[in-house]
Amino acid sequence: MEKYAGVMKQFPEKVWQQTDKYLHNSIALLKPQTYIAGFKLFCYDYSIVITPTPPPDSYINNRLISFSSGEVVIFNPGDTMLCCKAQLTKQYFSLMLQPELMNRIAEEIGISGELHFEKLKNPFSSEVMQLILAFDKETKRTDCINLMIESMSIQIAATILRTYKSNMKKYTEFTSDNSPCINIAIEFMQAFYGANISIEDICKEINISPFHFIRTFNKKLGISPYQYLINIRIKKAEELLNTGQYTVAEVATLCGFINLSHFSSTFKKSTGHAPSRYSKAYY
């Protein structure tokens, strides 16, 4: 497709042929199995990369960057990347969103000017991941509907805009009964409950000390920030189990629990039922 000609030229022909891909007018989904090293890649679109294992160290806009597990990497148009090491990896997702789509959605929700994501490395979002998986599944259908692809593309783009920090306004107006830092912390937990976030991560987001944050949170809500986050995860786990579309282990991962045992014990303590029994009881 002509819109992605620049991207295609940057891939070695063999790698491009071996990459699972779906190219659409406003969105493209690639699933490579290797990292390309040795030459600089140029980003023409907004690119969201989600990998099962940390990518090799890379020069991003000429600055050496190291990556960790569980991160979502976001590139803006015009960014450059030079991977230090070519290596095979488990298949990963590389989602490309056309600037026209992203800026149109940003404008529709009241934001003018060119969109720019502020962070290269971002926490994992199970909501974004579920939408990408659903999109990937739809593209593989023999009866794939173009209107469905368009609708899912808008949903993915809008969710990414709501989830990750950009130069557009992200947070809603603060309520009168809570301090601004508490509202921001709650929105952060609601957005990233599926990631391995800590109190320190939240405090960096709102720029206050953990001691002051925990004390203020307890005073305002009568519950610790950790327990509030657990409650969000349990509620989301109930919703996912009720759909019948996920195994207990998948729900544990999507909801940010460190392992299945921790999820099962926490879920039973909160609901009075084991996750497997809860799912069966619903049906």
Image (tube, grey):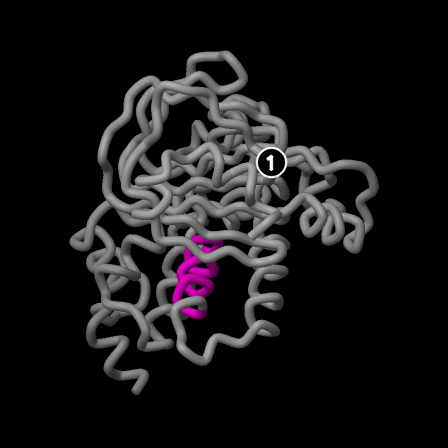
Position above or below: 120 against 39: below
Residue 71 at what x, y percent from top left? 39, 36
Asked if one can make out residue 186 in the rendered structure from this viewpoint, the answer is no
In the image as oriented, which residue stretches furthest toward the front?
13
Between 82 and 181, the residue placed more toward the observer is: 82
Residue 264 at what x, y percent from top left? 21, 59
Between 70 and 80, the residue placed more toward the observer is: 80
Q: Secondary structure at mark 1?
A: loop
In the image as oriented, which residue stretches furthest toward the bottom?
283
Image quadrant assignment for residue 116: top right
Q: What residue do we see at 52% from left, 25% from top? A: 204
Asked if one can make out residue 88 in the rendered structure from this viewpoint, the answer is yes
Q: State left or right for residue 171 relative to residue 157.
A: right
Q: What residue do we see at 51% from left, 55% from top? A: 23
Q: Is residue 210 magenta?
A: no
Between 252 and 29, the residue placed more toward the observer is: 29
Q: Residues within 10 Å of mark 1 (few under 14, many from 20)?
A: many
Which quarter of the rendering shows the C terminus? bottom left
Q: What residue do we see at 34% from left, 38% from top? A: 70
Residue 104 at what x, y percent from top left? 75, 51
Q: Is residue 132 magenta?
A: yes
Q: What secondary structure is the stretch in magenta mostly built from?
A: helix
In the image as oriented, which residue stretches furthest toward the top?
63
What range of the chain is rendered magenta? 127-138
Position above or below: 249 against 172: below
Specify the amino acid type for callout 1. Answer: Tyr
**Which residue carries the number 1 mark?**
44
Position above or below: 139 against 144: above
Residue 186 at what x, y percent from top left? 56, 45
Q: What residue do we see at 29% from left, 49% from top? A: 257
Between 229 and 146, the residue placed more toward the observer is: 146
